[in-house]
Amino acid sequence: MHILKRLYLKDFRNYKSECFEFSPQLNAIIGKNAQGKTNLLEAIYLLMTGRSFRTSNLSDLPYFGCSSFYLEAHFEKAGIEQTLKMTYHEKERIIILNQTPIPTLSSLFGIILGVIITPEDRALIVGPPLQRRQFLNLHIARTNPFYLHHFRRYEKALKQRNTLLRQKRSHSIEVWEEQMAISGAYLIQERVREAEELEKKSHEIQKLLSFDKEELTLKYKSSLSSKEIFQEMLAKTRNKDLLLGYTSIGPHKEDLSIVLDGKEARSFASEGQKRGIITALRMAEWQLLKDKTEDFPIFCIDDMGIFLDKKREEILLSLLPSLGQVFLTSPRSLPELNPSPHLLTISQGRIFRQTP
């Protein structure tokens, strides 16, 4: 089981210097808006994935007027105590696991496993296809290093092909198309497989959250079923792509279809249903990570008080004790839970009160 025991934040968002102690079960972070609740979960997510769920720039994260921040997490994994440190200073980042430097942000994958539900997740349903591709990419890459390898190879070959297309040159373009076809076919294969697994899990969770009234289905949409077909299609679209100046087909253009009761969720689902779908998807993600790693990932929920309607919230709260270590934030007090949560009240980037 992954257990985050202690977290120290220095010059991170609105935290000048603060150290948090956590329970191995349910941790409830309570406080009014703009006090630092989400910032705390953002720091945890940053250590899990190497990225923020709110910004793509680490330079946005230091305390006002600072150019650096420091995070230090003490956690337990497979019964072994470990320490993960991240320093950011003027665009340079240093990550150290115990005493070993970690070379890249993606190298964080798998060190501290976890899933987070945030209000920003609404973009998974109503946002552009890029949002859903990024969801699949991150989910798969966290347990499959080969996926990350092929993703990087594909991105490199795509960049080279697009450069040639913009220059209206086709000489040597076949070399990059072959690399794109090899790695792209692997990406598509893994996305299709993972979408099927996510559908199985999320379908059952959606039925539970909706009292057996809603059917959630997922389908990864692609017409490129093999390396040979992809390479053939790249050759066929080459003249059109030369006019466009970019590659018009491939896994960088595809989408994950999210359907509720036979209709596209982005257009027909209510706001409450969309929040339910997001919850089902994130819980399915958590279950798949658990199955693949045979461990309990951390589970986080940001802004519990506004995320679900009362009935769906009650169901979700009833499931929390089975999820291992849980972090949730709320602007209001929570209903009585069993076991009682470890309460942290946050005010202006400080721990105002802590109840074991």
Image: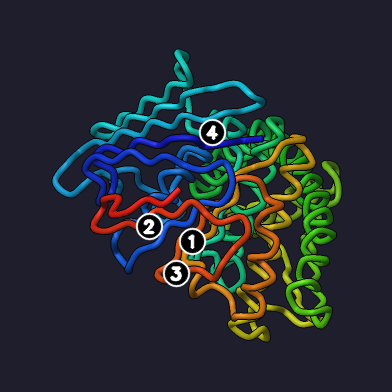
Please, what is the three-letter code of the amino acid marked with disc 3? Ser
Using the rendered view, name the quadrant where residue 66 is placed.
top left
Which of marks 1 and 4 precedes in the sequence? Answer: 4
Residue at the image point whose x is 85% and y is 51% from the top: 225
Near-viewer residue (11 or 141): 11
The residue that disc 4 covers is 106
Quadrant location of the N terminus in the rendered image: top right
Please, what is the three-letter code of the amino acid marked with disc 4? Ser
Q: Nearer the viewer, mark 3 or mark 4?
A: 3
Which of marks 2 and 3 precedes in the sequence? Answer: 2
Q: Position of residue 82 (x, y in %)?
A: 52, 22
Q: CA distance from mark 3 to mark 4?
A: 36 Å
Q: Position of residue 157 (x, y in %)?
A: 61, 37
Quick one: label 3, few (<14), some, or many (20+) residues within 10 Å? Answer: some
- Residue 185 relative to residue 70: left or right: right
Near-viewer residue (110 or 322): 322
The residue that disc 3 covers is 333
Quick one: label 2, few (<14), some, or many (20+) residues within 10 Å? Answer: many
Q: Is residue 10 above or below residue 346?
A: above
Residue at the image point whose x is 35% and y is 64% from the top: 31
Which of marks 3 and 1 precedes in the sequence? Answer: 1
Indicate the secondary structure of the residue bearing disc 3: loop
The residue that disc 1 covers is 302
- Residue 188 relative to residue 298: left or right: right
Please, what is the three-letter code of the amino acid marked with disc 1? Asp
**Quick check: marks 2 and 1 in contact, CB under 8 Å?**
yes
**Quick check: marks 4 and 1 in contact, CB under 8 Å?**
no
Which of marks 1 and 2 precedes in the sequence? Answer: 2
Q: Is residue 53 above or below residue 34?
A: above
- Res 297 seen here: yes
The residue that disc 2 covers is 37
Which of marks 4 and 3 precedes in the sequence? Answer: 4
